[in-house]
Image (spheres, rainbow, N blue to C red):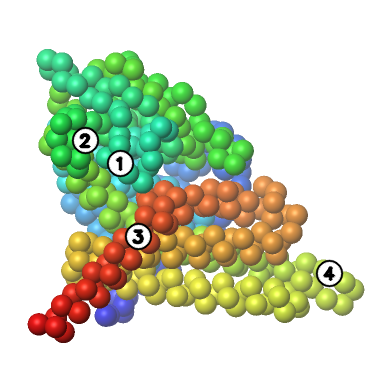
């Protein structure tokens, strides 16, 4: 494996690091704890600087307006941007828009791309992705109950979605709905492009996450589809391909998420170090003098380094072999990195004491929102099951080969 970086990529990462620390981190608390709409002009100004630097939408090809990063380079940039909750948004590669751009790039018709993909890449529109439902296990999307029925030249959608991230202010939603109940389980659902101002589409509420309702991009909504009629041409891809398309979206997303989590964990560790170095606990000692705190920092640094190496190795393998060949490794990095993140954040809250529980620093925001890392895109238990099955299969194959 070769992780050597080109001179140009090193310079791009260096610029991004400085931009995050100098321009993004100082405004993050103001943006996160006010109405998102009120901060749009300041965010747009920073986004324009990123565009001028040529780093806008790094996950998309140059031909469609992106920066054309490969998976390893994108992971390294995601690590840098993950140090602030605003990082990916300001660089035009935020979830769920990033995954939706990839879906539209791969599966949309030319007219769909013109209507939906181009403004999404340009940053003039946001989107959301409606798959998870309140009455079904998100770990098993074959249980979806939202339905889409063809009525003449329109599809009629009925159902309810929740934890539809960033639906507040989104221009459209990619909705996953069952189109054929009689088909094999993984061929029952399809994807649809639904404008958020379409009659029958309603955002019921922003769901409080550990008490934080959020607004705009930083929110998770509950959505109702009540006889929502959309033109037949709003079907994305082929009927029945919803699950296969979702996997196309989720595969790269797990690499992006894991590297973003590495950035979050690094930020948390740095906050712990900075706080404990100046927190006086007696006339002659600060908190960082305590061996327990030093152990927390040392353990966190080692765990972050281990997770980072595992994720980069997996990203490199994906580039060489494809996602299918390293499915087990992709599952492994998902639960391993999410748990490292949770552990590091928990140590930081503990080290900062009462301050860590408040919104006076970024840590409480990260703690309540990143706990979901062990749940979304497949809970830990599902991914561990994937890895275990792979290990069992490898052992069985080895025994069969030895006996033959």
> Which mark sits nearer the N-terminus, 1 or 2?
1
Q: CA distance from mark 3 to mark 4?
A: 45 Å
Observer-side mark, 3 or 4, equals: 3
Q: Residue at x 49, y 49 (%)?
A: 372
Dot placed on the residue nearer the N-terminal end, 3 or 4 = 4
Instruction: Report the disc number at residue 189.
Output: 2
Location of mark 4 (residue): 281
As helix, strand or loop, the secondary structure at mark 4 comes to loop
Give the answer, above or below, for where 96 lies relative to 168.
Answer: below
Q: Nearer the viewer, mark 4 or mark 1?
A: 1
Give the residue at mark 3: 385
Q: Earlier in the sequence, mark 4 or mark 1?
A: 1
Q: Indicate the position of residue 183 as horizontal and vertical percent values.
A: 14, 35
* Name of the residue lying farthest toward the bottom: 402
- Find the distance from the CA under tag 1 to the CA under tag 3: 17 Å
Residue 334 drawn at (x, y percent)? 39, 60
Q: Which residue is mark 1?
A: 141
> Is label 4 or label 2 in front?
2
Q: Quadrant of the C terminus?
A: bottom left
| In-image side of 37 versus 333 (left or right) | right
What is the spatial separation of the Cα atoms under label 4 and label 2, in whole angstroms? 59 Å
The quarter of the picture where residue 67 lies is: bottom left
Q: Position of residue 99 (x, y in %)?
A: 30, 47
Q: Quadrant of the N terminus?
A: bottom left
Callout 1–callout 2 Cβ contact below 8 Å: yes
Contact, CB < 8 Å: mark 3 with mark 2? no
Which of discs 1 and 3 lies nearer the camera? The answer is 3
User: Is disc 1 surrounded by few (<14), some (14 to 19) or many (20+) residues within 10 Å?
Assistant: some
10 Å neighbourhood of mark 2: few (<14), some, or many (≥20)? many
Residue 74 rendering spot, x and y as whole percentages? 33, 62
């Amino acid at each position: 494996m070769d992780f050597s970086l080109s001179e140009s990529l090193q310079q791009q990462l260096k610029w991004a690091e400085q931009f995050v620390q100098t321009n993004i981190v100082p405004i993050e608390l103001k943006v996160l704890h006010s109405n998102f709409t009120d901060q749009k002009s300041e965010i747009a100004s920073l986004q324009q600087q990123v565009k001028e630097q040529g780093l806008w939408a790094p996950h998309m090809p140059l031909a469609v307006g992106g920066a054309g990063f490969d998976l390893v380079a994108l992971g390294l940039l995601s690590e840098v941007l993950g140090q602030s909750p605003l990082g990916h948004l300001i660089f035009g590669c935020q979830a769920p828009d990033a995954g939706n751009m990839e879906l539209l790039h791969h599966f949309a018709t030319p007219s769909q791309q013109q209507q939906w993909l181009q403004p999404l890449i340009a940053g003039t529109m946001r989107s959301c992705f409606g798959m998870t439902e309140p009455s079904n296990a998100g770990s098993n999307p074959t249980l979806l109950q939202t339905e889409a029925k063809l009525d003449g030249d329109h599809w009629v959608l009925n159902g309810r979605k929740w934890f539809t991230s960033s639906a507040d202010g989104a221009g459209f939603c990619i909705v996953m709905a069952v189109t054929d109940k009689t088909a094999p389980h993984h061929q029952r659902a399809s994807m649809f492009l639904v404008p958020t101002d379409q009659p029958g589409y309603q955002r019921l509420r922003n769901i409080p996450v550990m008490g934080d309702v959020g607004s705009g991009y930083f929110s998770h909504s509950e959505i109702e589809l009540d006889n929502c009629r959309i033109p037949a041409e709003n079907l994305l891809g082929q009927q029945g391909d919803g699950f296969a398309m979702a996997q196309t979206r989720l595969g790269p997303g797990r690499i992006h998420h894991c590297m973003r989590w590495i950035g979050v964990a690094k930020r948390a560790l740095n906050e712990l170090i900075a706080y404990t170095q100046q927190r006086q606990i007696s006339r002659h000692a600060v908190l960082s003098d305590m061996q327990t705190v030093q152990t927390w920092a040392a353990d966190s640094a080692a765990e972050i380094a281990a997770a980072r190496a595992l994720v980069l190795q997996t990203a490199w393998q994906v580039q060489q072999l494809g996602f299918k060949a390293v499915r087990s490794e992709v599952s492994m990095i998902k639960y391993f990195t999410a748990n490292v993140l949770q552990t590091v954040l928990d140590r930081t809250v503990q080290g900062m004491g009462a301050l860590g529980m408040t919104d006076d620093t970024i840590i409480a925001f990260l703690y309540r929102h990143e706990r979901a890392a062990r749940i979304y895109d497949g809970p830990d238990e599902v991914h561990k099951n994937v890895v275990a099955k792979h290990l069992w299969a490898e052992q069985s194959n080895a025994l069969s080969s030895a006996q033959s």
